[in-house]
Amino acid sequence: MGGAFLGTLIKPRDPLRLPMDPGVERAKQSAARAAAAQVVRGQRLGLGTGSTAAYAVREIARRFPDGGGFQCVASSAATATLAGELGLSVRDLAAGDSFDVMLDGADEVSDRLDLTKGGGGALFREKLLARRAKKLLIMVDPTKLVPRLGTRTPIPVEVVPFARPVVVEELGKRGLPAILRTVPGTTQSFRSDNGLEILDVRPPTPIEDPGALDAEIHGIPGVLETGLFVGLAERVFVGHADGTVEERVRR
């Protein structure tokens, strides 16, 4: 199923490979420090995926060199490996789990604090943990702020490989062109930690009602999850290169 794809290649981001812009990296580090400062010893933590989430994991480990007594569940194998190497206790998700805090990054943050996520391919697990968290704290640099979702990045959709051609067709009927995400430098389809494929969907215009679009895409057989996170974030920490952090709170 991994050969053909439609349109321009969109490469998945390596969650732990950081971009080269030093100003952006300082901004992300500032946001991660501010969010990690909200963590209290002994809490149950959901850990997101991506470069900014990795900064937060490192900051938590720095603040609590003894491991902090945390119970952590990670949204990806990459984050689980990083947290474990830094001395944090990571375990699998269990029945009845809930989390005091989840920390994660985002690809877009709208004025209403809705999110586009899934650039690292962990959207299903990230959303599952976010929905089980009392507080979802999001960390971004200013480039991720948009008036409406779909402005600067495509919307990831995780799909069953067998159903992918039908999902692409159904999305096309709705005016939503979809591109199969591939492994960088190859024509092989990228697979999530769930073994599924990712379609990157580019709406023709910014999204007016992300909740309605999320529900509509979920109605297509073969779709597991979308990267539209609507009404989940409690706070967004926007870091800046000078070390200052702006905190936005959902009203």
Image (tube, rainbow, N blue to C red):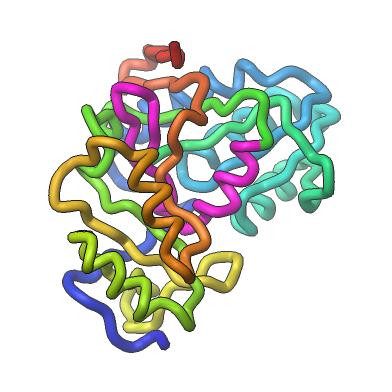
Quarter occupied by the N terminus: bottom left
Please tell me which residue lies in front, 225 or 151. Answer: 225
Residue sitting farthest toward the left:
204
Above or below residue 231? Residue 17 is below
The residue that appears at 40% across and 47% down in the rendered structure is 214
Q: Quadrant of residue 251?
A: top left
Count of residue discs: 0
Q: Which of 230 and 66 lies nearest the eye of the viewer? A: 230
Residue at x 22%, y 28% (from the top left corner): 147
Which residue shows up at 49% across the image and 19% down it?
Answer: 235
Is residue 164 found left or right of 200 in the rendered image? Answer: right
Q: Is residue 116 above or below residue 165?
A: above
- Magenta-drawn stretch contains 128: yes
Query: Residue 205: x and y, percent?
Result: 14, 45
Position of residue 195 measured from the top left corner of the image (x, y, whole percent): 57, 73
Q: Is residue 108 left or right of residue 160?
A: left
Pick the front one: 223 or 78: 223
In which image quadrant can residue 237 be found?
A: top left
Q: In the visual, does 135 lie left or right of 210?
A: right
Q: Which residues are magenta?
A: 107-131
- The answer to whether residue 235 is above or below residue 83 is above
Q: Residue at x 28, y 26 (%)?
A: 142
Q: Position of residue 69 (x, y in %)?
A: 85, 29
Residue 90 x/y as whole percent? 77, 46
